[in-house]
Image (cartoon, rainbow, N blue to C red):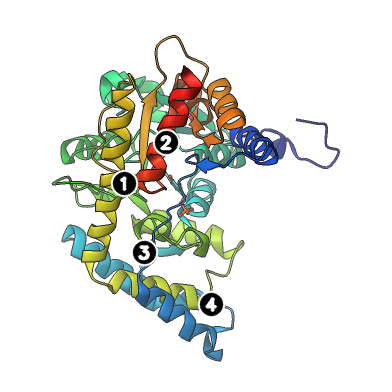
């Protein structure tokens, strides 16, 4: 980083994103006149439920939505989030004490760490992991203990390998399944183990859970909150970005342990005034809309997954079909191991943008992540160009 006379040590400790390097590579390709197929970002291209857009349109011309929205004004949202959770996981949630609206789950995670840790506290975090985690721990100035995720362990952390002294001192653990970037999934048994480990060690278990609805076939993504002791130690972060394809609207919600929710509410009260009420109404409408659309949208991602994975395997990559998420996590073909060089050169010469695995942590090296955010025929064009690049 260049020296910046105003930047705090905290700001300077923020990791540089390899996505900025990718952005430059895409711009260079566009300047050369190449058509860009951007599979590097997990921004859903599908439509939100119509009811959500209708609700927002109505709200925008309704003067009663224009003012500051303090906590009591979020009650309808909290009640609907609790009902939405109960429909999915058959567990009753208290909308007064166990739900909090967020301005996106990313905001929620960063503020949650500020709410439940002090500088220097230990946070257990996966590597590879969603890049915002690396920023959030830098903002909170906590000490990170990485939980390595490897193909051999199904990209799940192995709790028995965590040093018992570190476990005793840790304040929080972050997990996220269906996972970004690895697209790995967890079952109920794993979630119960995670809850029990955190319960035994007095750790807050943060389950970043934006991909709850992007699931394929018979697979249903488990919640931590309906495990035994789940609400004693757990909090989950949900997102309208993934469940309803509303990334730009910036709305998420936290559900979980009432002390963690209260601490998060306290920190947020110094930082924001909640999302615009019209957007809350839009997400309420999305939550109430028929589950059939959510299922159909997941099918679209599943079909894209099938097309992409089959084409990659035909071309000699070795990729398994994930059971959930909007990603394919692929080990680079034999002989290649620098994911940033691979992704930057591919983008510059062919206009195909993928996310280099290194951007998700040291242990992401050697992989690239494809986001399934384009139609099957475009995915095919992308693989054709990758094949030309590798020839
Ligand atoms: C694991 C994970 N958490 C959080 C987010 C951010 O979601 P939001 O748009 O709700 O901030 C993403 C977005 O891609 C994600 O993959």
For the residue pair 387 and 247, the one nearer the viewer reads as 387
| Viewer-side residue, 58 vs 116 | 58
Dot 4 or dot 1, earlier in sequence: 4
Marks 1 and 3 sit apart, C-alpha to C-alpha, by 15 Å
- Numbered tag placed on residue 99 in the rendering: 3
Taking the image as drawn, is residue 128 in sight?
A: no
Q: Residue at x 30, y 40 (%)?
A: 305
Q: CA distance from mark 2 to mark 3?
A: 33 Å
Q: Residue furthest top?
A: 335
Label pair 4/3, CB-CB below 8 angstroms: no
Mark 4 sits on what residue? 69
Circle 2 is placed at which residue position?
A: 370
User: Of callouts 2 and 1, which one flags the residue occurring earlier in the amino acid sequence?
Assistant: 1
State which mark lies toward you, 1 or 3. Answer: 3
Q: Residues within 10 Å of mark 3 (few under 14, many from 20)?
A: many
**Does label 1 or label 3 sit earlier along the sequence?**
3
Distance Cα–Cα, label 4 vs label 3: 16 Å
Callout 2 secondary element: strand
| Between 211 and 27, the one nearer to me in the picture | 27
Say how many tags the image has: 4
Q: Residues within 10 Å of mark 1 (few under 14, many from 20)?
A: many
Q: Which numbered disc covers residue 233?
A: 1
Q: Residue 255, percent across and down?
A: 34, 58
């Amino acid at each position: 980083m260049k020296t910046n006379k105003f930047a705090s040590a905290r700001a300077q400790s923020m990791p540089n994103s390899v996505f900025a390097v990718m952005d430059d590579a895409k711009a260079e390709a566009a300047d050369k006149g190449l058509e860009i197929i951007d599979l590097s970002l997990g921004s859903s291209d599908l439509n939100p439920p119509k009811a959500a857009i209708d609700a927002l349109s109505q709200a925008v011309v309704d003067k009663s939505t224009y003012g500051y929205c303090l906590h009591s004004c979020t009650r309808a949202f909290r009640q609907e989030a609790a009902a939405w959770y109960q429909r999915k996981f058959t567990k009753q949630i208290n909308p007064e004490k166990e739900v909090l609206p967020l301005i996106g789950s990313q905001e929620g995670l960063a503020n949650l760490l500020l709410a439940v840790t002090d500088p220097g506290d230990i946070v257990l975090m996966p590597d590879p992991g969603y890049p915002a985690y690396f920023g959030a721990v830098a903002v909170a100035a906590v000490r990170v203990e990485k939980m390595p995720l490897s193909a051999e362990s199904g990209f799940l952390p192995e709790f028995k390998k965590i040093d018992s002294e570190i476990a005793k001192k840790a304040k929080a653990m972050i997990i996220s399944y269906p996972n970004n970037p690895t697209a790995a999934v967890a079952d109920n048994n794993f979630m119960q183990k995670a809850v029990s480990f955190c319960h035994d060690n007095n750790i807050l278990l943060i389950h970043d859970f934006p991909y709850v609805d992007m699931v394929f076939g018979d697979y249903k993504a488990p919640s931590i909150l309906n495990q035994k002791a789940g609400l004693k130690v757990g909090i989950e972060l949900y997102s309208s970005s993934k469940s309803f394809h509303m990334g730009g609207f910036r709305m998420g919600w936290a559900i979980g342990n009432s002390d963690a929710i209260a601490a998060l509410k306290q920190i947020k009260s110094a930082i924001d005034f909640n999302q615009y009420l019209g957007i809350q109404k839009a997400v309420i409408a999305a939550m109430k809309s028929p589950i059939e659309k959510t299922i159909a949208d997941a099918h679209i991602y599943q079909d894209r997954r099938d097309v992409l994975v089959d084409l990659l395997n035909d071309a000699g990559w070795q990729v398994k079909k994930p059971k959930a998420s909007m990603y394919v996590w692929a080990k680079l073909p034999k002989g290649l191991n620098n994911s940033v060089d691979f992704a930057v050169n591919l983008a510059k010469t062919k206009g195909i943008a993928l996310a280099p695995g290194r951007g998700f942590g040291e242990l992401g090296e050697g992989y690239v992540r494809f986001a399934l955010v384009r139609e099957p025929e475009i995915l095919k064009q992308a693989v054709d160009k990758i094949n030309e690049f590798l020839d």
